Image: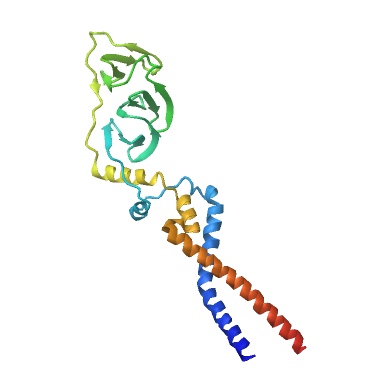
Amino acid sequence: MAHKKAKASAVRRLHRSFGAGASLFLMFMVLSGLTINHSNGLGLDQRHVTQPLLLGWYGLGGPENINSFQTAEHWLSFAGSQLYLNAAPVSTISNGIGAVSMGGMIVVAGSDELLLLDGEGSLIERLSANAIGAGPIESIGLLEGQTVTVKSMGQLWLADAELLSWSPSPDSAEAPVWSLPQPTPDTLRQTISRQYRGEGLSIERVLLDFHSGRIFGPVGVLVYDLLALAVGFLAVSGLVFWSRGRRNSKRKN
């Protein structure tokens, strides 16, 4: 009889010890689970991590190169295939080679397409190099400060005022002012690098990894499994104590 009481007392002590630690774990799981369940409504799938420590934990590095071009009012920067207007990501483009502004619009050139953006960076249209009659685009510039000009395979192509049609430049035309890369300001480079690293890591992804323990690797998953077993032990031992207490109460009555 004494042995059974000692055993029951030991189980109760384990129940209390596990309960203290597991309660924190359960609170974390409840809060993270609720947040994940409403992540779309909170926009967490569209918001990205910018903290260097967390980005480094995931092994996300910055872009190899940032090429920047300055127009009259803006900085246009290329980091990989991502295009930035000042420090804000606005679109994607392959092999960015320059940008010019004209009449409130921004024309960005890649090797095989042009992007037309409004002054806020919203995409208006994409034009392939083939659509304007040119081959691979080598340069973009302005002729007399108002005519968008691209160079392709040694030939200059001039756009009309609405950028709807293009025609070969006559041999007598003046040389355009080409868009040339400029040194990226340090503050702009740092901001773009942080954003570039975080674009592949949403807050929703981090929450999911915390919730499952994957953020800590295989060891984290194992620890979470042990904590889950501890919660199961609490549930079972709690039912046992409740059942025994109920039987003892009936006997006394």
Of all residues, the one furthest to the right in this rendering is 253
Q: Quadrant of the C terminus?
A: bottom right
Judging depth in this view, the residue of 52 and 107 nearest the camera is 52
Report whether 230 appears left or right of 60. Answer: right
Determine which quarter of the picture holds residue 85.
top left
Report whether 32 appears left or right of 238. Answer: left
The residue that appears at 60% across and 88% down in the rendered structure is: 3
Determine which quarter of the picture holds residue 243.
bottom right
Judging depth in this view, the residue of 222 and 201 nearest the camera is 222
The residue that appears at 54% across and 65% down in the rendered structure is: 228
Q: Is 185 situated above or below 252?
A: above
The residue that appears at 27% across and 34% down in the rendered structure is: 68
The percent coordinates of residue 197 (x first, y second) are 35, 46
Counting the numbered discs, the total is 0
Q: Quadrant of the N terminus?
A: bottom right
Report whether 141 appears left or right of 238. Answer: left
The answer, for residue 81, to whether it is visible in the render is yes
Judging depth in this view, the residue of 124 and 239 nearest the camera is 239
Determine which quarter of the picture holds residue 178.
top left
The percent coordinates of residue 48 (x first, y second) are 42, 47
The percent coordinates of residue 17 (x first, y second) are 52, 77
The percent coordinates of residue 24 (x first, y second) are 51, 69
The answer, for residue 120, to whether it is visible in the render is no
Q: Is 121 situated above or below 1?
A: above
What kind of colouring is applied to the model shown? rainbow
